[in-house]
Image: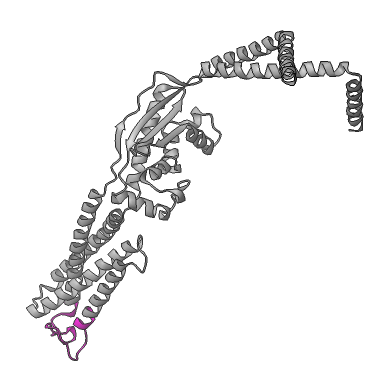
């Protein structure tokens, strides 16, 4: 009996719901169709957006460029990549480079985005561009998809390809690999050494033209050659030490070994040029050389020093260039972006379906709420409550 009564109650409740829906069907249909139609109109007004994609393959984890970039990027002066502290893979690194300020600024200038986006400040154009950039990495393959969304399909493709080009330019310009740092350092030092060598040659030439050629014995020439070679080697190794300190700590074994070599060379130079006394070297000390032209010897020593230094730096520069060539950042473009034929947004069908479902739900809830309020007003007790609520509301408004 009790079970039959429950079933009857459920049937009555279901019938009550159907009665409410039929009673308020005009309201439900009006609200649902109104919101759906409004959404459809809005979807037609919204401008079309196209998405162009370019796919690239960055250097693998094992390549020295990626490892050096990952370890040294934060130390590059004036460079800032958002979230660099969380970089774990080469893919994360290049995603960070794509969103870096140097790349975004280059894109803003290249496509005149301040005027295009009608931005008041460069920062506004940069932020708008960053929102339109959709870059992500496929974890399994390591392929990075560089996508740009824009109202113009051709411009979207051009910007996607330009992002890749600007990132390549940035990675080429950043001297963050060991070989790159050595090359830049040696180029500067070699330039200075060449200028010094030219000055020494001109000085020697002028001295000989003024005083006549001075012939010195072979022993003196050998001492000059040896001292100049050692001094040049010391100078070159000090340059190498400066380079190494840009990416290695003081406790690095290679740094300590190089410092020890420099100390040994300086001791050897001190013994070779010592004044008087016992000397274990096979060369005669400079203090006991015959007086064959002090000025000539000084200029000859300076010339030989600059020649030796220039030759050493030139060899080291060539070695650094070869290392840099082996470590070159090779970003392979798998697919260049092409103007898309289909829009990516607005998704009109999806918008209309969602609007229909949501408006139908809201209108049904509204129908039951209206029915509840209507029935509550017919109940004397609820009528008193509604009246009290109205009085309290009016009282608060008058106080306010």
State the residue at coordinates (32%, 53%): 177
x, y percent for residue 117? 51, 29
Q: Say left or right for 218 vs 306.
A: left
State the residue at coordinates (32%, 29%): 336
Q: Nearer the viewer, residue 182 or 70?
A: 70
x, y percent for residue 19? 73, 10
Q: Quadrant of residue 165?
A: top left
Q: Say left or right for 148 vs 201.
A: right
**Which quarter of the rendering shows the N terminus?**
top right
Q: Nearer the viewer, residue 206 or 70?
A: 70
Quick check: is 281 in the magenta stretch?
A: yes
Report the coloring of the rendering: one colour
x, y percent for residue 224? 15, 76
Please determine whether, in this image, residue 211 is positioned above or below residue 279.
above
Please determine whether, in this image, residue 358 is positioned above or below residue 109.
above
Magenta residues (range): 269-296
State the residue at coordinates (60%, 18%): 357
Q: Main secondary structure of the magenta part?
A: loop
Quick check: is 93 in the magenta stretch?
A: no
State the residue at coordinates (65%, 12%): 34
Please determine whether, in this image, residue 146 is positioned above or below residue 242.
above
| Residue 292 visible | yes
Q: Nearer the viewer, residue 59 or 310?
A: 59
x, y percent for residue 144? 37, 36
Q: Quadrant of residue 240?
A: bottom left
């Amino acid at each position: 009996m009790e079970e039959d009564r429950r079933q009857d109650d459920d049937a009555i409740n279901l019938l009550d719901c159907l009665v409410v829906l039929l009673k308020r069907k005009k309201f439900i249909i009006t609200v649902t169709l109104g919101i759906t139609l409004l959404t459809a109109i809005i979807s037609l007004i919204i401008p079309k957006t196209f998405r162009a994609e370019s796919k690239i393959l960055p250097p693998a984890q094992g390549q020295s460029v990626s490892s050096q970039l990952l370890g040294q990027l934060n130390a590059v002066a004036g460079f800032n990549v958002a979230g660099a502290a969380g970089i774990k893979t080469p893919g994360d690194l290049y995603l960070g480079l794509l969103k870096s300020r140097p790349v975004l600024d280059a894109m803003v200038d290249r496509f005149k985005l301040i005027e295009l986006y009608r931005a008041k400040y460069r920062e506004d154009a940069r932020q708008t561009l960053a929102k339109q950039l959709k870059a992500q990495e496929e974890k399994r393959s390591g392929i990075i998809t560089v996508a740009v969304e824009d109202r113009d399909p051709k411009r979207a493709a051009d910007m996607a390809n330009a992002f890749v080009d600007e990132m390549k330019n940035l990675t080429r310009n950043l001297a963050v690999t060991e070989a790159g740092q050595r090359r830049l350092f040696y180029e500067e030092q070699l330039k200075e050494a060449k200028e010094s060598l030219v000055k020494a040659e001109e000085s020697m030439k002028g001295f000989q033209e003024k005083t006549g050629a001075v012939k010195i014995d072979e022993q003196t020439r050998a001492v000059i050659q040896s001292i100049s070679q050692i001094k040049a080697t010391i100078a070159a190794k000090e340059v190498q030490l400066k380079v190494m300190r840009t990416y290695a700590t003081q406790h690095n074994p290679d740094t300590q070994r190089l410092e020890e070599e420099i100390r040994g060379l300086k001791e050897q130079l001190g013994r070779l040029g010592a004044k008087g006394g016992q000397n274990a070297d096979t060369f005669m000390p400079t203090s006991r050389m015959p007086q064959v032209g002090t000025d000539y010897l000084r200029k000859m020593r300076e010339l030989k020093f600059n020649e030796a230094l220039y030759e050493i730096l030139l060899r080291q520069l060539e070695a650094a260039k070869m290392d840099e060539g082996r470590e070159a950042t090779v970003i392979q473009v798998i697919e260049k972006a092409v103007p898309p034929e289909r829009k990516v947004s607005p998704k009109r069908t999806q918008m209309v379906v969602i609007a229909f479902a949501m408006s139908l739900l809201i209108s049904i809830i509204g129908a039951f709420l209206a029915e509840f309020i209507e029935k509550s007003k017919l109940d004397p007790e609820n009528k008193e409550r509604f009246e009290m609520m109205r009085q309290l509301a009016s009282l608060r408004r008058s106080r306010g």
